[in-house]
Amino acid sequence: MANVSVAAEWQLLYNRYYRKPEIYQMRWKHVDLSRNKVACASFGGPIAVIRDDSKIVQLYAESALRKLRIFNSAGVLLSETVWKHPGGRLIGMSWSDDQTLISIVQDGTIYRYNIHAELIQPNVTMGKECFEQNVVECVFWGNGVVCLTEGGQLFCISDFKTMKPYKLADVPGLTEDDMLQPSCLAVREPQYTMSGNVEVLVAVGDEIYVVDEDEAQSIRFDEPGGEDSEMGNDDYGGSLIGPVQKMIVSPNGKFLTLFTHDGRIVVVGMESKQIAIDYSCESALPPQQMAWCGMDSVLLYWDEDLMMVGPLGDPVHYFYDEPVILIPECDGVRILSNTSLEFLQRVPDSTESIFKIGSTSPAALLYDALDHFDRRSAKADENLRLIRSSLSEAVESCIDAAGHEFDVTRQRALLRAASYGQAFSSNFQRDRVQETCRTLRVLNAVRDPDIGIPLSIQQYKLLTPVVLISRLINAHSHLLALRISEYLGMNKEVVIMHWACAKITASPSTPDTHLLEILLDKLQLCRGISYAAVATHADNCGRRKLAAMLVEHEPRSTKQVPLLLSIGEEDTALVKATESGDTDLVYLVIFHIWQKRPPLEFFAMIQGRVLARDLFVAYARCHKQEFLKDFFLSTGQIHEVAFLLWKESWDMGKNPMASKGSPLHGPRIKLIEKASNLFSQTKEHTFESKAAEEHAKLLRIQHELEASTKQAIFVDSSINDTIRTCIVLRNNRAAAKVKSEFKVSDKRWYWLKTFALATIKDWEALEKFSKERRPPTGFRPFVEACIDADEKAEALKYIPKLSDLVERGEAYARIGMAKEAADAAAQANDGGELLERFRKTFSQNAIFDTLKMPFQGA
């Protein structure tokens, strides 16, 4: 009998059953759909209602001001606001995929609302042409809209996220003839077109045009059995359908349903151009609404009559004594009336196999076996034996049928039947029942009238749990969203964070400390949650103190420090950044404070932070030396300023202009002298002061030498090189002056002059210099200079004068005079070490063999 009562509610369309269970009794009051414009979101979403200003209606006990009201699918009021927008009458409104209400008025202005009836800024316009010509019709799809103007032009927004309108191609004849107007429009969504762009179908007279951004192309369709039905020419062949009064595209974009001028329902393939259905209605009056019911049938609604047409067989009629709204879904159509919400869908195969009258399928016998089992009848065992080979299939059918049911009692009965059969089946996946139970618990929770989201199981799988939770938190059903997240093992962070932000927004008068306790109590439920994101929202709401207290609990410095800066907590941000040890964060804080605070205040802040100070100094040395000088002066580090000045003088010397003349040498000298003065103010840097003073003196002399010799070869060379260069240039007076100014010792003077004269091969002057007085260095420099110049004859003038026999022997050896080297080595009092070394060097020379015996005896 249960099967009979279930199947009695079904309607047969040819060989397919349809059912229309009531989901809700609407809870709203005094809502007449015929007096209002209504926008219903898909996937059981909210319903927007506003009084239709294109109709003359009688006002009852209500304000003359129009109100935009938003209900859930059960008619529970979620929010409302007064509609007071300019721009002419409301042309159309619809919900986008992210449940934003898109409303378009006559001048092309788009107003957007969230589910709480809060206006989303900024407003967007469809463009200048829409403003001048006025919008007369608009067609929405999931995330876009097409608008038709009085001038016959089409404008499109293909994505509400970007909100960029653009013009579509002109329909032939439509823009030229003001009297010619489209009879209807339909949209083929971008994901179903070959080009990937939106296509608009426009019915004008006897023609149907497919319009995109580039062109408008007329199409024709083949009549059933036509001679050209298989031909694929450019004109598509066949005869015309005739003037079309209404048309809609199927959910998958493959079929187009047309209602013609003579009352025919024609369904044609978009790609094949073949007519699949051609049914003549009793009336040629166009229906008020048309909608696809899944992919199996088409619904047409006139006053009080809802007709469903399928591929074959007689249509099914449903009669209503009140206006209805058809809301297409992926697996059926929701039917909204003033008093109820129904869901018309094709009966699932699993449900049909169980509840169809007279069914003997394994699933039906299993369901019947449970009934016998409950009545303690032996018939239960008999049914199980009959279906033992198909028991797994029967269990699967019961589970599937339970998922498609809206009635909780029937869900429970079907799941009990599945569990009963599962107990006798050894090869069935045990987690299928648990999985379906988990899904149904979620669906039943959101189907509750207070939540009002009547999802079917197919819609739920297509929508995904993540999006469902997102919609719940947007509707401020945070508790249910949190419980579903926990139940499904999903991340709770998104739910808790959204709740925290909503709590802050809704609690403007709650003290910060009390609100912080409330927030922390919930935020601590989720490890790793971003306190910084909640603190950012608090700051945006003007709760800066609360934001500062929240960000203290953020464990990640990378999120904590930027937020502290944004709310003006620079001191705390600097502390947190330095404690983290992250140099990038420290630099971020330094640069922020640098721009916001006066220099002295900035210096005081970083002086006490070693890491921050060192990083600032390292950066400023390379890029902001003048500012770094101010920092060192403010902190009393005068010697550091001196070092900077000295380095600046060297950097100035690297300037290419410095090598061409004197303009830059004067400033360099002044910088070095200034550095010397600063060094002299500290006792610890006496050496640096003296060195800087000497450097300035040397640089001045070198500058004078370059000016007198007109050769840029002196500046930035050492004292030794300066003296050597002067001697090479035969400017002995200048060399002597440098020697005198810098107190060069006689020994160094002799070395420098000796090698300089050897460099220019002035052997006469060298010999004369050696005889001026006894050299303080001895004659070794003279010998070294001559040998280095490869002048053996000149070297022999000075080698005999070497007093050290070892040096004399080595000198002879270097110029290849083995005998003299051996004589000197023999006379040297070094225990024969030098002689032994020479013997190895001159191993082929017989001279050393003659000296072998005496020394061995010694």
Image (cartoon, rainbow, N blue to C red):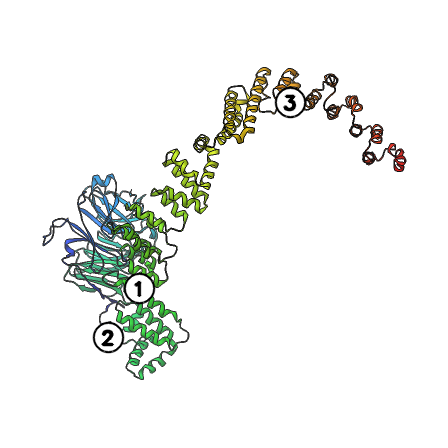
Question: Which callout, 3 or 1, points at the residue further toward the start of the chain?
Answer: 1
Q: Looking at the rendering, which quadrant does residue 528 occupy?
A: bottom left
Quadrant containing the N terminus is bottom left
Within 10 Å of disc 3 (Cα), the crowding (few <14, some 14-19, many 20+) is some
Q: Which mark is residue 462?
A: none
Within 10 Å of disc 2 (Cα), the crowding (few <14, some 14-19, many 20+) is few
- Secondary element under disc 3, as helix, strand or loop, is loop
Q: Measured along the vertical axis of the image, is residue 738 above or below residue 387?
A: above
Name which residue type carries label 3. Val
Residue drawn at the location 30% of the way across and 46% of the way down: 545
Q: Disc 1 or disc 2, which is closer to the eye?
A: 1
- Secondary element under disc 2, as helix, strand or loop, is helix
Alpha carbons under labels 3 and 2: distance apart: 124 Å
Q: Looking at the rendering, which quadrant does residue 523 occupy?
A: bottom left
| x then y, percent, for residue 308 | 22, 62
Q: Looking at the rendering, which quadrant does residue 563 occupy?
A: top left
Name which residue type carries label 2. Val
Q: Measured along the vertical axis of the image, is residue 294 above or below residue 204?
A: below
Report whether 206 appears left or right of 490. Answer: left
Residue extending furthest bottom?
378
Name which residue type carries label 1. Val
Q: Disc 3 or disc 1, which is closer to the eye?
A: 3
| x then y, percent, for residue 642 | 50, 29
Report whether 483 appears left or right of 104. Answer: right
| Residue closer to the observer: 749 or 224 | 749
Tell me the residue that label 1 is attached to.
442
Tell me the residue that label 3 is attached to.
744
Tell me the residue that label 2 is attached to.
4
- The answer to whether residue 194 is visible is no
